[in-house]
């Protein structure tokens, strides 16, 4: 390949089995600007879970695609995402993080909106001309849709419907949601943190099986010292699969990690719940739900990590090329005992928490990468080729990351791509009744 024809951001050489990403994508303001326009202004972005607004008038304010939004269930029960900017002169109309409110009154001049977004009150409205029409000045609302309680929004009218956009990621969302027939809920409380590294490094890391045994050595040693051999480990090698789910979504699947410090009560409840899953779905799907872990990235900037003993939902958003804000929530099945809830929360805190055994180590690794990118002029390309040309890429291979990067490159540059492997992994992700092999 001549220098002139070298692609700017991604080299995807199927013939030689090489995949490279130009480190410019991690440090360039221009690339971040392209991402804002081609990803965050267009894609379906994760907003929250319906369980967070279970009662009418519940709301949370949060950042989605760089905008502040009000995620709320209106008085009639409709889930809404309202852009938190007053139609008068721009102020945020809600300054609280969460609560239960029918009306949002702007702090600046007092315009008031109900939680369906309608402008319901303007102080001294007599001063406006007859051309001033309140009904045209409701809070703006992006397109909103949900799947199994996971709510997404897009700021584009052109983006395909959510179900098409999610592609085979729906099967993984099903597996996560099938855990309880009483539904899933987000635990109250949030992990918010930032890192001095590019947001895409955490997307990679969220499905990266390759780093687990090196970066998280302390965690695995602790598990073994507690007498638990993680079943995800075969000898000293991690086993499992990476699967492309379409549209940049991907998952790393692995037999469940051992669960340390499980009390008799928790063990018993686990066995009971597993038996219920077998009765409801059959053995094959019950294994997927209860005995596999799944690290999934949802393009462009969210991840769901279900390690059986805890489920982390996270989003990441760039403040600058080398600075990312991350928000993490814990998802939990409804209808479980208090001991099981405590067990899951303990695991979540000790693994993903700010002082946990996983998150700080991951962040350290990613910040080291970002510091390494200071030499991008001299060392331009990162290598993400592992497992290319393999028929069955393992969890420690990098297919999952290539799936993300190919879609990223398509959205930024318009270059199209095909799946690396025939999507033959349906047995891993679909229920037995709908499983097919081959085909697009
Ligand atoms: S900016 Fe909201 S009332 Fe003026
Ligand atoms: Fe990690």
Image: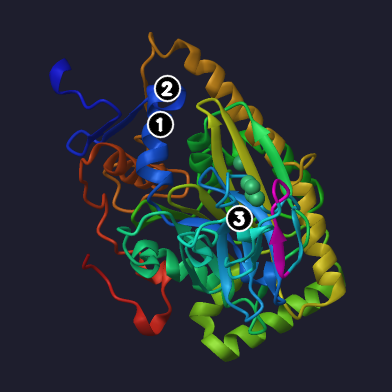
Q: Magenta-highlighted stretch: main secondary structure?
A: loop
Residue corresponding to mark 3: 127
Whether residue 92 is visible, yes or no, is: no
Q: Is residue 421 left or right of residue 105?
A: left
Q: Nearer the viewer, residue 260 or 36?
A: 36
Query: Which element type, helix, strand or loop, lies under badge 1?
Result: helix
Query: Which element type, helix, strand or loop, lies under badge 3?
Result: helix
Q: Earlier in the sequence, mark 1 or mark 3?
A: 1
Identity of the residue drawn at 52% across and 86% down? 282
| Labelled disc at residue 33 | 1
Task: Tell me where residue 287 sits by quadrant.
Answer: bottom right
Q: Nearer the viewer, mark 2 or mark 1?
A: 1
| Mark 1 and mark 3: Cα distance apart in space | 41 Å
Task: Tell me where residue 366 sits by quadrant.
Answer: top right
Where is residue 334 drawn, in percent x and y? 72, 77
| Labelled disc at residue 395 | none
Vertical comparison of 32 with 170: above or below = above
Give the residues drawn in magenta, as a range.
102-109
Residue 104 in the magenta stretch? The answer is yes
| Mark 2 and mark 3: Cα distance apart in space | 49 Å
Q: Residues within 10 Å of mark 3 (few under 14, many from 20)?
A: few
Query: Which element type, helix, strand or loop, lies under badge 2?
Result: loop
């Amino acid at each position: 390949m001549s220098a002139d024809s070298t692609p700017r951001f991604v080299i995807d050489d199927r013939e030689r089995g090489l995949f490279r990403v130009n480190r410019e994508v991690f440090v360039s303001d221009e690339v971040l600007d392209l991402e804002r326009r081609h990803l965050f202004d267009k894609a379906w972005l994760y907003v929250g879970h319906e369980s967070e607004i279970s009662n009418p008038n519940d709301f949370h304010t949060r950042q989605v695609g760089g905008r502040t939004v009000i995620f709320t269930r209106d008085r009639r029960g409709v889930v809404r995402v309202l852009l938190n900017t007053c139609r008068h002169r721009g102020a945020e109309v809600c300054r609280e993080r969460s609560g239960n409110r029918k009306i949002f009154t702007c702090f600046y001049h007092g315009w008031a909106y109900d939680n369906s977004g309608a402008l319901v009150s303007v102080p001294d409205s007599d001063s406006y001309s007859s051309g001033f029409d309140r009904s045209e000045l409701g809070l703006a609302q992006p397109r909103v849709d949900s799947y199994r309680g996971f709510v997404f929004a897009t700021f584009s009218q052109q983006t395909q419907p959510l179900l098409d956009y999610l592609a085979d990621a729906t099967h993984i969302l099903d597996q996560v949601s099938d855990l309880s027939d009483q539904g899933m809920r987000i635990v109250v409380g949030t992990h918010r943190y930032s890192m001095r590294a590019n947001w895409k490094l955490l997307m990679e890391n969220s499905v990266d099986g390759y780093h687990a045994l090196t970066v998280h050595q302390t965690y695995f040693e602790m598990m073994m010292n507690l007498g638990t051999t993680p079943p995800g480990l075969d000898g000293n090698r991690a086993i499992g699969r990476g699967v492309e789910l379409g549209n940049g979504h991907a998952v790393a699947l692995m037999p469940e990690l051992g669960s340390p410090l499980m009390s008799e009560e928790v063990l018993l409840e686990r066995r009971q719940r597993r038996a219920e899953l077998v009765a409801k779905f059959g053995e094959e799907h019950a294994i997927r739900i209860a005995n596999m872990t799944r690290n999934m990235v949802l393009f462009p900037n969210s991840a769901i990590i279900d390690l059986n003993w805890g489920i982390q939902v996270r989003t990441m958003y760039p403040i600058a090329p080398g600075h990312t804000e991350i928000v993490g929530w814990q998802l939990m099945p409804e209808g479980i005992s208090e001991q099981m809830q405590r067990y899951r929360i303990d695991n979540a805190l000790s693994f993903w928490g700010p002082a946990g055994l996983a998150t700080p180590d991951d962040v350290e690794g990613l910040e080291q990468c970002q510091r390494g990118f200071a030499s991008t002029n001299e060392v331009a390309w990162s290598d993400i080729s592992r497992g290319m040309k393999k028929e069955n890429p393992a969890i420690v291979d990098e297919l999952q990351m290539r799936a993300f990067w190919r879609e990223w490159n398509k959205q930024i540059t318009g270059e199209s791509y095909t799946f690396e492997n025939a999507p033959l992994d349906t047995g891993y992700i679909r229920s037995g009744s709908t499983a097919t092999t081959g085909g697009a």
